[in-house]
Amino acid sequence: MARSSYHHGDLRQSLIECACAQLRQDSADHLSLRALARKAGVSQTAPYRHFETKNALFAAVATYGFLLMTDHLKVARDRHEGDVQEAVVQVGLAYVEWALANPEKYQLFFDSALVDYGAHEDLHEAGCDCFEVILGLIRTGIEQDIFLDQPAEELAATLWASVHGFASLLQSKDPNAMQQHQDAPVVKGMAALSMRRRQVIELFVNSIRR
Amino acid sequence: MARSSYHHGDLRQSLIECACAQLRQDSADHLSLRALARKAGVSQTAPYRHFETKNALFAAVATYGFLLMTDHLKVARDRHEGDVQEAVVQVGLAYVEWALANPEKYQLFFDSALVDYGAHEDLHEAGCDCFEVILGLIRTGIEQDIFLDQPAEELAATLWASVHGFASLLQSKDPNAMQQHQDAPVVKGMAALSMRRRQVIELFVNSIRR
DNA sequence: GGCTGATGTTTTCGATGTAAACATTGTTCT
DNA sequence: AGAACAATGTTTACATCGAAAACATCAGCC
């Protein structure tokens, strides 16, 4: 972490990754640019050379997150090139898995309080690219008469809403973290859903089938 | 807003409602207890008599929100007492509507960074009560052989995930606020979904039908 | 009428976001 | 090679914030 030269080398990316690590341990409103700067071994205002404001850093983290997630989804998709139906299910699974493995980044995607899509064009594009993975598959599926004959954007958005809700709920009602309330119906339901993940996603996919 | 007596009267509830109003205009991390205190016409540390920390205030806002939402859902449910299938659809619609009408409260429900369910038992209960509205309907539906023969908690959680995803996405990709990107597929899809709200929810409900 | 607990106030502290002026380095043009 | 310039990092400064501590005022009960 120590730095011999005056310049850091890649402070921007360092800050993004430090922020991810930090966000995993503590909530977003406890994250301070100053603490990040310290951890990166840099003066307290150095981050402002790379991010106009704290929210701009969050936007950068989210953008970075979208890039990672998009790659992850593409890998899942490419493993099932011949079978669109199965590819969609696998991408859905991969979506939920990535969200659960990277909660700090995933939550930023939808936290309009912390991140302003309007002010960061690259973030918007990164989000669109991610959606395109789902959208492309749905388009193929519609061509092959697998999915309902409706606008592809609409079906893709429907599916996205389902898997997003699934991932988001699993995060916020994480059965592992809710041990004190193991017997609450909500928690029981989410635990069951979590275990039957594949079937649940198949249910979502089936709901837009012909 | 001026106060004649030394005591405020109902500072606790006032702060909760001031916080809601404020959260609508500015993001959560820009909300300060001091500003709330000023708006309530009270000294800067008075709020600490009612909320141990800033997060405790957020938890209280969320709890209050759950109470309101639960009432809203119950009204929708009771309007269709004979017809479970329709009641579920209407509750789903009411859920999405309430979420869109009260984004600042709704987002708190799922913002584990701002709100700690483990530390606030009443919040957890309020959330459970809200879930019970859905769960109760699903139970009745299962008894009447309308829904899949699976654990009620699981079906209810599935449905909840769907409507939550729907509401959450609609909020974060609000077509009205994304005019700069009207032609992006994501936005087109969400706009379409928003207009065909009832059909989308019927789709979700059908996915757990027999 | 005075005691007690609940509620509100004042004072105070260290930490934070961010602006401004300055220092150092890498790059590019001659 | 050397000079100008842009990019990056530093120092200093300020208003604001969350929160703790000690104190003030009120309401209800004996």
Image: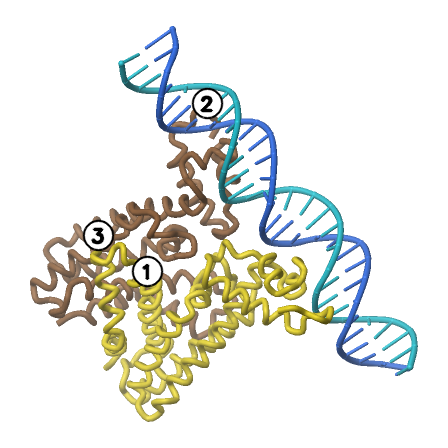
Chain colours: A yellow, B brown, C blue, D cyan
Circle 3 sits on which residue? B76
At horizontal 67% and vertical 64% (from top left) the residue drawn is: A49
Q: Amino acid at mark 3?
A: Ala
Place of residue A9 in the rendered image (x, y in percent of width and height, measured from the top left) = 67, 73
Label 1 sits on a secondary structure element that is helix
* Image depth: mark 3 or mark 2 in front: 2
Residue B146 circle label:
none
**Residue A154 as seen in the image, left or right of residue A187:** right
Residue B195 appears in the picture as rendered: no
Classify A10 as above or below A113: below
Are dots 1 and 2 on a single chain? no
Foreground of the two, B47 or B172 = B47
Residue A116 appears in the picture as rendered: yes
Label 2 sits on a secondary structure element that is loop
Place of residue B179 in the rendered image (x, y in percent of width and height, measured from the top left) = 49, 65
Marks 3 and 2 sit apart, C-alpha to C-alpha, by: 42 Å
Q: Residue furthest left?
A: B144
Res B18 → quadrant: top left
Label 3 sits on a secondary structure element that is helix
Q: Amino acid at mark 1?
A: Ala
First-in-chain label (3 vs 2): 2
Res B156 → quadrant: bottom left
Label 3 chain ID:
B
At horizontal 41% and vertical 47% (from top left) the residue drawn is: B58
Circle 2 sits on which residue? B6
At horizontal 27% and vertical 48% (from top left) the residue drawn is: B126
Circle 1 sits on which residue? A177
Foreground of the two, B193 or B37 = B37
**Residue A52 as seen in the image, left or right of residue B49:** right
